[in-house]
Image: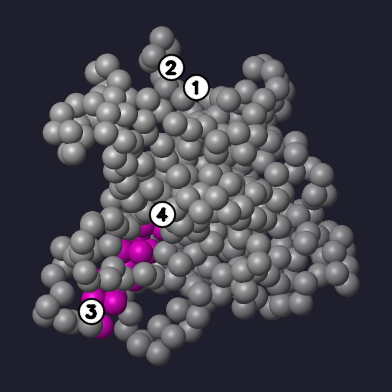
Amino acid sequence: MGAAGSKLEKALGDQFPEGERYFGLENFGNTCYCNSVLQALYFCAPFREQLLEYYGNGKNTGDAEENLLTCLADLFTQISSQKKKTGVIAPKRFVQRLKKQNELFRSYMHQDAHEFLNFLLNELVDILEKEAQAVKSDPETSPTEKIANGPKHALANGVSKEPLVTWVHKNFQGILTNETRCLQCETVTARDETFFDLSLDIEQNSSITSCLKNFSSTETLNAEDKFFCDKCCSLQEAQKRMKIKKPPHILVIHLKRFKYIEQLGRYKKLSYRVVFPLELKLSNTVEDADIEYSLFAVVVHVGTGPNHGHYVSLVKSHNHWLFFDDENVEMIDESAVQTFFGSPQEYSSNTDHGYILFYESIGASNNKS
């Protein structure tokens, strides 16, 4: 990629950010799902900083056991310490470790980038928690008192011991609250659960804002879906809604582009046009305070179906937008981001659609875009 690398350097010229590195990642047959997510995470400034800091501190221990966290830290360190500004790196150790760790990623089948991101963040949390427990070696701490490490895991009420909050949690974890109001006695039951990303149902010619509104819309539970109210001690009609209680620092939004179609007996890709803004106001929060986010990365699925295709990523770094396609890196104009919203008609030659969106909250002290 020498030529492409020098082309990127020429394009940026003296605007090339000091100390920054733009490296493509080699594809080992079917690892574009992994490469596209790794680029998005590398350009998530607070996550990269904390990972490199972790690596710097951990090197002193010398005999640290290899795991997915050490392999990721090693890869990010390798990229950030390159003498050249651009080029290609082979994330061989990381991919080998990933396949060793999870048989899901071993085959040469087309893999899902969202499943990979989910697995990776939860795995990093597990490793950090085990390390923290090993450091503590506190006989009073029972291993069962583990934190909810990711999506769809309810927080235990009334547990006095504070769960461990790792730097992965500090970046990506938010809290949802599931409110159910009994229509008979008006009692509201709230249950909290943590999340690392929000998976949103999508509709044709919609926007992220409308998808978020639908996510938090009120649903009536009646007929077979009645709710058991503890106060009435019986099944009652109720209203249920999901709100964001604690918005995360990094908001990851997964658009549910793959839908199971009963008649076909398989998944189909929804190429719907869903507008995602460069600046997003989050209003479906418990406090009703608008929280502003800025888009810094998009993982794009290229192709017509769920079982084949390709992943690329768009990344914002120091106010420039870059396009990463495995080994290739090029500069793109900010206006080009809108070509990845999706197709307004069902059959279109454009098959490049935004799939995972990464937003960072604005006004955060460590925002470096």
Residue 255 in sight here: no
Q: Is residue 122 above or below residue 267?
A: below
Q: Which residue is mark 3?
A: 134
Q: Secondary structure at mark 4?
A: strand
Badge 4: residue crowd in 10 Å (few <14, some 14–19, many ≥20): many
Identify residue for label 2.
261
Relative to residue 36, is residue 2 depicted above or below?
A: below
Cβ–Cβ under 8 Å for marks 3 and 1: no
Q: Residue furthest bottom?
A: 60
Q: Which residue is mark 4?
A: 175
Compare residues 177 and 144 and report the one nearer the observer.
Answer: 177
Splitting the image into 4 quarters, where does residue 304 fall? top right
- Work out whether mark 4 precedes mark 3 in sequence or the reverse, and give the earlier one: 3
The relative height of residue 200 versus residue 96 in the rendered view (above or below) is above
Q: How many marks?
A: 4
Where does residue 114 sit, x and y in percent of width and height?
A: 47, 44
Q: Is residue 89 found left or right of 146 in the rendered image?
A: right
Q: Give x and y (percent) for residue 124.
A: 38, 64
Crowd around label 1: few <14 · some 14–19 · many ≥20 (10 Å): some
Q: Earlier in the sequence, mark 3 or mark 2?
A: 3
Q: Which picture quadrant has residue 312?
A: top right
Mark 2 or 4 closer to N-term? Answer: 4
Q: Amino acid at mark 1?
A: Lys
Q: Marks 2 and 3: in contact by CB < 8 Å?
A: no
Q: Which residues are magenta?
A: 120-135
Amino acid of disc 2? Ile
The part of the image, by quadrant, that contains residue 367 is: bottom right
Please give the label number shown on residue 268. 1
